[in-house]
Amino acid sequence: MLASLVPIAPDSPFPLENLPLGVFRRSSGAITVGTALGDQAVDLAELARRGAFVADGRLAETLLAGAQAGALNPLMAAGGEVRRTLRQRLQRLFSTELRDQAGVLAATLEPLAGVELMLPAVIGDYTDFYSSKHHAFNVGSMMRGPEQALQPNWVELPVGYHGRAGTVVVSGTPIRRPRGQTMKDGDARPTFGPSRRLDIELETGCFIAGETRLGETVPMAGARERIFGYALLNDWSARDIQKWEYVPLGPFLAKNFATSVSGWVVTPEALAPFEVPGEPQQPEPLEYLREPGPRGYDVTLELWLKPAGASEAVRIIESNMRHLYWSPRQQLVHHASNGCRLRSGDLLGSGTISGPEKSSRGCLLELTWGGREPVTLPDGSTRTFLEDGDEVILTGFTKGPDYRIGFGECRGTILPA
Ligand code: CA
């Protein structure tokens, strides 16, 4: 672990190797852009005001613009070089350069427990993919049987749909159970009322860096520079509404009532040591979608449920980012392949990430096999879908030789309809 002037506990998710980026409200009320170090939040705009980045070109003005906007978009637009410069400078500042700068440290640090994380970016557009083969196979098996579980297009392109950017919310925002049309088996007409099959989807999201013009495409060779970082994402889903409304145009009101993301965005630089080959792709993708290098990240993803009235959360799903079939770069390249414009702050959801084990199925629909195999909780009660008052917590982390990279958490509590 890199030596730090700020004490870092051995199991801290936020050592100097991580430096996730986010937006938060300080206890003073000021909104700023910052990072997490040990158990401290670091106000990067305040560091800029105190001259910490005078040797780093546009970095200071970019951070101040971010604080002004209350969003990471200016940093996302500035490109990968600026982000990497920030990382290197922070590692030097907090390992040695601020050693005798007690005044600067006092002004820029504040316990994480005292700040309020906000949505990391102004999200112009949100797209959600469907890129875990295990998930697509399981859901397809339930709907069409195992022989026709995957549609022929699934192995040729990253299937996705346009989501609702305006209802992406930061971790901690309560989620109101949606009402909608559902059709019971055997009924002649649908009914309108609260969803009875409210589900989670364990995903990650990536934020786009930089802008493409309308008509411009992104070649695979340029895709890595277009990804600013990764967050945890929960694509809340009302399965009963979805089942009735999705024909023939796909998800609509079953998905767009809320999507939660974590406040911290973990950079590709922090995750670089944890790249893995990814799932084998057969058939070989068409040329524009071929990605020669590693396609996966070894990041453990967990989903914890704190049932209404319980004092403790229980882990019900453990999966891993490595189970994605289509990588975030392939999703991005495909998204731009028709000339569709991408802008800084756009959010691409990975799709539910399920692994091969039952315990790694990334949503309740799969975990309970359509509600037929309820999950038994420690107190003996069972769950098929979410109940009012249930709290859901997503976490993500990976481990280096002597340090840990954490994503923080993405949580939400279900409110009655
Ligand atoms: Ca999804």
Image: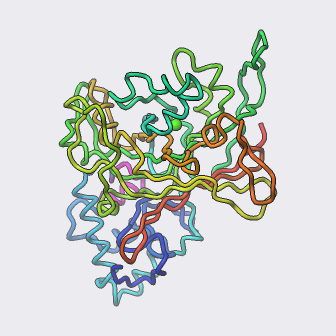
Residue 242: x %, y % from top left: 62, 26
Q: From the viewer's side, name the closer residue of 136 and 266.
A: 136
> What's the residue at 54%, 66% (across, down)?
26
Left or right relative to 132: residue 1: left
Quadrant position of residue 404: bottom left
Q: Is residue 313 above or below residue 166?
A: below
Q: Is residue 68 magenta?
A: yes
Q: From the viewer's side, name the closer residue of 139 and 269.
A: 139
> What's the residue at 35%, 30% (across, down)?
155
Quadrant position of residue 363: top right
Q: Is residue 292 above or below residue 316?
A: above
Residue 360: x %, y % from top left: 54, 50
> What's the residue at 31%, 78% (across, down)?
93
Left or right relative to 122: residue 86: left
Quarter of the picture holding the C terminus: top right
Residue 308: x %, y % from top left: 78, 53
Q: How many marks?
A: 0
Please tell me whether the stretch drawn in magenta is mainly helix, strand or loop.
Answer: helix
Outermost top residue: 188
Range drawn in magenta = 60-75
**By what rule are the colours in the image chosen?**
rainbow
Residue 399: x %, y % from top left: 41, 68
Quarter of the picture holding the N terminus: bottom left
Q: Is residue 24 above or below residue 137?
A: below
